[in-house]
Image (cartoon, rainbow, N blue to C red):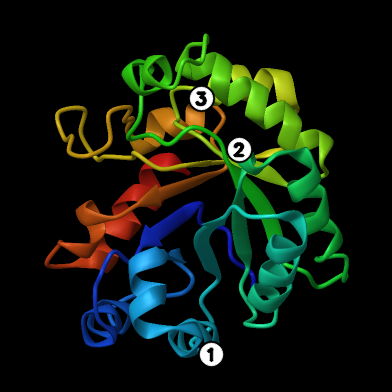
Amino acid sequence: MNQTSPVIVALDFSSEAETMQLVDQLDPSLCRLKVGKELFTRCGPSLVKQLVDKNFDVFLDLKYHDIPNTVAHACSAAADLGVWMLNVHALGGEKMMLAAKQALADEHAPLLIAVTWLTSSGQIELDALGIKATPQQMVSRLAVMSQNAGLDGVVCSAQEAPILRQDMGSDFLLVTPGIRLADSEQDDQCRVVTPKKAIADGASYLVIGRPITQSKDPCKVLRTINSDIS
């Protein structure tokens, strides 16, 4: 597809009916779609295939984290679904990420990115784990490890995007959740940024959920966002 929008709509639903009610209102030229753990667990690969068949680029957000061989086979299975992008958890280590990348060696393989430090977590969680680092330092360490393993990019907060863009180069993808349409909007994400600022700070793709999925006119919201950041 000739897809240029950086917006990825998070399909945070618990059923196929809810999901398709929204998807049928969307235009593949305006966005990509993200399928996470709850939706995939409830609806399975068949839903992913439906979305791909509707010409949407699908980001399969399952954050694989296991022994290298298991993760490699899981990534290969995900690629067979025709997804555009999938991810692993960088905390699984460089050996695991290398195995995942090698499992996607085909020229038509999906993009492979790694989750760094979840945007719902901050300094308190790092301290509780006994990790002597700030969230930004943790993200940077995991991003370097991901790049060394040959991955295409990472998931990170848009607040970390400026320094990662500077350190990782222009080709490394930065996929940013925690995007809200106004600074005042905040929920379970504790590091949030608006779309325009995220793009200006170096983000490659923006994961946006409720501001779009709970809107009365999702396509209108998408057009506004795309216009604002173009």
Looking at the picture, which amino acid does disc 3 mark?
Asp
Above or below: residue 184 compared with residue 60: above
Closest to the observer: 228 or 192? 192
Residue on which disc 1 sits: 53
SS class of the residue under badge 2? helix
Q: Can residue 129 be spotted in the picture? A: yes
Q: Residue at x 51, y 34 (%)?
A: 156
Mark 3 against mark 1, which lies toward the viewer?
1
Q: Residue at x 37, y 60 (%)?
A: 9
Residue on which disc 3 sits: 201
Are circles 1 and 2 on residues that touch, CB within 8 Å? no
Residue 170 picture location, percent across and down: 73, 32
SS class of the residue under badge 3? loop
What whole-number distance in Å separates the C-alpha atoms at marks 3 and 1?
33 Å
Residue 48 picture location, percent across and down: 49, 81
Residue on which disc 2 sits: 91
Looking at the picture, which amino acid does disc 1 mark?
Asp
Disc 1 crowd rating (10 Å Cα; few below 14, some 14-19, many 20+) is few
Looking at the picture, which amino acid does disc 2 mark?
Leu
Q: Is residue 156 left or right of residue 164?
A: left
